[in-house]
């Protein structure tokens, strides 16, 4: 996947996130600064409100994956990024007490490099932080998030 694809016009489409009619497609990025720190966001809304993870969100209708991840990082953190390759796919499915699917996302995770802007929480992010790879334990990340960050870090380190 390259960062040279032109952005297409996209349209936000209202969808039911809770008890969705179909899985929802999202994008996220493990964004690294020049020092190799990763950009994390603290979620401001359910599911997982208050937990730390990667910046990202739902893809809009007519939007490419790369354009979507750029937009989401800009909206949540106020920074511009250069998007690298796919680092993983995350499929969180949450069921309610009756066993019905309450949330179902398919999230494509990329690695990316920070280009410009000062990271501040925007949109649905309650907080942002640049975290060193050896300091991730302090953020109580989900195992799948930790795994994709570590894989993305290796991809970022080996970039051209």
Image (cartoon, helix red, strand yellow):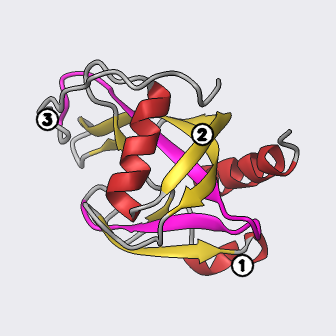
- Residue 153 is situated, as x and y percent measured from the top left of the image, at 76, 53
> 71 or 6: nearer the eye?
6
> 16 or 34: nearer the eye?
34
Please tell me which residue is depicted at 53% across the width and 61% down the height of the picture: 116
Mark 1 = which residue? 135
Please tell me which residue is depicted at 42% across the width and 23% down the height of the picture: 64
**Is label 1 or label 2 in front?**
2
- Residue 111 is situated, as x and y percent measured from the top left of the image, at 65, 44
| Magenta run includes residue 124 | no
SS of the residue under disc 1: helix
- Residue 38 is situated, as x and y percent measured from the top left of the image, at 64, 64
Few, some or many C-alpha atoms within 10 Å of disc 1 (few <14, some 14-19, many ≥20)? few
**Is label 3 or label 2 in front?**
2
Alpha-carbon distance for marks 1 and 2?
24 Å
Query: Are the residues flagged by discs 3 and 2 in contact, CB closer than 8 Å?
Result: no
Asked if residue 56 shows in the view, the reply is: no
Please tell me which residue is depicted at 72% across the width and 47% down the height of the picture: 152
SS of the residue under disc 2: strand
Q: In the picture, residue 105 is in which quadrant? A: top left
Upstream in sequence: badge 1 or badge 2: 2
**The N terminus - image quarter:** top right
Upstream in sequence: badge 3 or badge 2: 3
Mark 2 = which residue? 83
What number is the disc on residue 9?
A: none
């Amino acid at each position: 996947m390259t960062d040279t694809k032109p952005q297409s016009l996209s349209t936000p489409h209202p969808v039911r996130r809770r008890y969705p009619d179909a899985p929802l497609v999202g994008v996220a990025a493990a964004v690294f600064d020049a020092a190799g720190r990763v950009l994390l966001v603290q979620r401001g809304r359910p599911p997982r409100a208050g937990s730390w993870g990667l910046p990202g969100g739902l893809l809009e209708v007519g939007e490419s994956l790369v354009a979507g991840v750029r937009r989401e990082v800009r909206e949540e953190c106020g920074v511009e990024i250069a998007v690298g390759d796919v680092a993983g796919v995350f499929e969180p499915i949450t069921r309610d007490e009756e066993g019905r699917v309450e949330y179902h996302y398919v999230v494509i995770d990329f690695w990316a490099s920070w280009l410009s802007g000062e990271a501040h929480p925007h949109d649905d992010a309650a907080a942002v932080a640049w975290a060193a790879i050896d300091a991730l334990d302090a953020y109580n990340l989900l195992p799948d998030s930790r795994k994709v960050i570590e894989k993305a870090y290796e991809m970022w380190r080996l970039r051209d």
